[in-house]
Image (tube, helix red, strand yellow):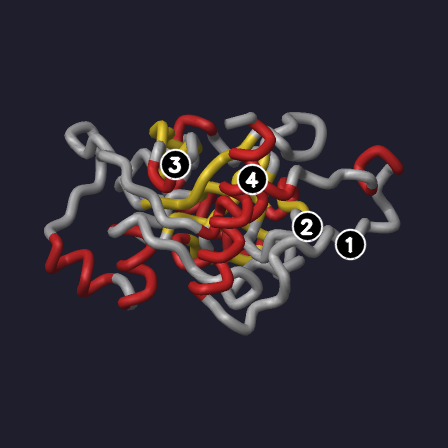
Amino acid sequence: MKLWTLATLLAAAAFAAAVFLHADNKPVMSSASPNPSTPASEAAYCPPDDTKSACGLPSKVVIDMSKAKVQRTDAEWRARLTPEQYRVARQQGTEPPFRNAYWDNHADGVYACVGCETPLFDSRHKFDSGTGWPSFWQPLEKVFIGEERDTSWGMVRVEVHCSVCGSHLGHVFDDGPRPTRLRYCINSASLNFLPRAEYDAWAAKNSPATPRAE
Ligand SMILES: [Zn+2]
């Protein structure tokens, strides 16, 4: 089978699955609306359709939790998370495009892990990918993002998770905008958004360099 035929079939399968997951969603193939303030090269950004919809499929990777700093029992995870957050973050599920908390959130702030509060992504690195999921061109700190090769659904994808607690986040693709050309396609259910002022207060309180008031 020719490569392009396989790619077309995979794109069709991914599209069908995404539609199945959420029947009345907007078409996942819709293109990003260019931001008028972005340079022409950025406005022309348009990732290939076959990988755009690949965010819509769940993962089946084995995440090595032996070195994870935050570890909880299954009962503790269920008590901490909503059923949707548990399904996505702890069972490598996915959420419907355009029907999740942050895909269209343009507020200034930081996105923290739903499982352990580690700050993972910054709104300054968020862009409109047109996929219906929050998308970032880089994480806040690469050390907090673990990666696993994901070969489920007949595709080769790179699964990303929080390295501190092992919560599944989404996938990273190499069709993002400049300067990294990466596209972190992340489930809203795995994130908690903190407005900038709230994040700054949290960071000041948790920074090891901050001298404690006597
Ligand atoms: Zn975490």
- In this view of the protein, which residue sits in the foreground, 134 or 194? 134
Name the front one of labels 2 and 4.
4
Across and down, in percent, residue 140 comes to 52, 35
- Mark 2, Cα crowd under 10 Å, few <14 / some 14-19 / many 20+, is many
- CB within 8 Å, label 3 to label 1: no
Mark 1: which secondary structure? loop
**What residue lies at 35% left-to-right and 33% top-to-bottom?**
150
Mark 4: amino acid? Thr
The answer for how far apart the CA atoms under marks 3 and 1 are is 30 Å
Image quarter for residue 41? Answer: top right
With 38 as the anchor, is 78 left or right in this view? left
Residue occupied by mark 3 = 154
Image quarter for residue 133? Answer: bottom right
- In this view of the protein, which residue sits in the foreground, 24 or 119? 24
Residue occupied by mark 2 = 128
Instruction: Check mark 4 vs ligand 1: CB closer than 8 Å? yes or no.
Output: no
